[in-house]
Every structure is written in structure tokens, then in C-alpha cells.
Image (spheres, rainbow, N blue to C red):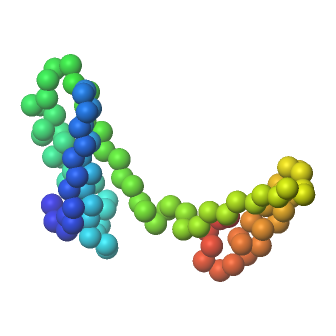
Amino acid sequence: MGNIQEVQSISSPENSMIILQFAWGTDMDAIAIDVRESLDQVGRFLPDDASAPSLFKFDPSMMPLMSVAVGSDEHNLVELQRLGELVAQRLERVPGVASA
């Protein structure tokens, strides 16, 4: 398994998490297969009452780059909601914006 940039391990009673950070451009589908195979091999060494290891892929490109909040002392909640929806609709028209 290559392209690993960072490894973090977080443990607490009855729980452990290992975070692998890979270089940009790494084929994450192929890496997920490699990690799953490694987890399957390690699983047989865990205590009998331990849960099977889980694998979660996180894609930071799916995280919002910007969050916007609307607030006012002069407008009520309904007016603010309408304003927020109007702003969201206009932002969604901008090329490259996935959703607002």
C-alpha cells in the first residue's frame, strides 16, 4: 500500500480508530480493496468478542468550502428563510457550484 502521507491512531476503552491519509491523486478504490484485505487478515487476531473492523472512506472534496448564515434583528424567520433560499438559488447558478 503506497502513497500514505500520514497515519493517526486514536484509541479509547473498547474502541480504536486508525486514520490513513493518502497523497492527492491516489486511486482510493484500489486502496480501499487493499485496506479491506488487510483488515480481514488482522481480524482473526482480535478477541472473539471484538466487532469486525470497519472501513470508511472520506472524500474531503465532498465537504463544503463555504457556509453562509443569514440573520437579522429586523426580519422574521419566514423572511430570512425566503432570503436564504433566494441566495442559495443564485449561488447554484454559478458554474462549478454543486449545490447551495
**Quadrant assignment, res 41:** top left
Q: What x and y, as percent, mark residue 61?
A: 46, 66
Q: Position of residue 90 (x, y in %)?
A: 77, 73
Instruction: Specify the quadrant that holds the C terminus.
Output: bottom right
User: Residue 41, can we see it?
Assistant: yes
18 above or below 97? above
18 or 46: nearer the viewer: 18
The residue located at (22%, 24%) in the rendering is 50
Q: Is residue 51 left or right of residue 84?
A: left
62 with respect to 47 (left or right):
right
Left or right: 75 with respect to 14? right
Quadrant of the image occupied by residue 91: bottom right
Residue at 18% x, 39% y is 40
Q: Nearer the viewer, residue 19 or 43?
A: 19
Report the residue at 24% width, 27% height from top. Answer: 13
In this orientation, does residue 30 appear? no
